[in-house]
Image (spheres, grey):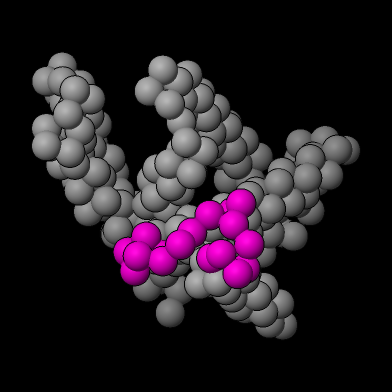
Amino acid sequence: TITPWMQFYLQSSIAEKGIRKEDYKASRLDVILGCSITDIIAFFIIVTCAATLFPSGIRINEASEAAIALKPLAGEYASFIFALCLANGSLLGVIIVPLATAYYICEAMGWEAGINKTFREAPQFMWIYTALIVVSALVILIPGAPLVFLMILASVVNGILLPFVLIYALSLVNNAKIMGEYVNPKSYNYITWGTVVVIICLTVFFVVTSIIAAGGKI
């Protein structure tokens, strides 16, 4: 649940909101709660799949198969709940991920960016955001498109990029010239660097096992 796009979206959205120094604690609490809730949900998704699909030997190749498979195994409303959660995740992805991409492309190029801006005020940002949504929609609407494979591929790419993003982010927050009085304290560094090392190890494991699994299907 820790992704490269999330790091860029988070800093861009906080900057655009104009969060004041006195609001930093509330903003940090908001981030911690959001990360904790998503991790808890992800944990129970894994547990649910392990308890229902895995014992029955069901291998999911399409999202619809997961919804249908859960119905006899987890109750009458299981497929409906799965579909609702899938729709929620899809809406989040189609809105936030392209938005994060548009943010960091425009920031890198020095272009105006912001969801409160008009097309005239931030044309590059709006066109990039719109193009990403349209192209993504066209790809997933291709008949017979391997959607599950595309999701796994996106996760693998995220896994490859994540270590670089985290190391760079930690380097920035430890730069006193940039952060000033808000530079990361040593006590936080022990926790953050330890967490980053664990995440990198798990990410490498995930990427390697995903590639091996994909290779076995070819």
- Quadrant for residue 106, please give it: bottom left
Residue farthest toward the right in the current orientation of the protein: 76
Residue farthest toward the bottom in the current orientation of the protein: 143
Please report the residue visible at 65 percent of the width from the left and 75 percent of the height from the top. 134
Residue 29 visible in the current orientation = no
Q: Quadrant of the N terminus?
A: top left
Q: Is residue 81 above or below residue 96?
A: above
Q: Tell me residue 110's x, y (percent).
A: 35, 65
Q: Is residue 160 above or below residue 201?
A: below
Please report the residue visible at 67 percent of the width from the left and 79 percent of the height from the top. 138
Q: Tell me residue 133's x, y (percent).
A: 62, 69
Q: Tell me residue 214's x, y (percent).
A: 41, 69
Please report the residue visible at 77 percent of the width from the left and 49 percent of the height from the top. 83
| Residue stretch rendered in magenta on the structure | 106-122
Magenta-colored segment: predominant secondary structure? loop
Camera-side residue: 151 or 75? 151
Residue farthest toward the front in the current orientation of the protein: 121
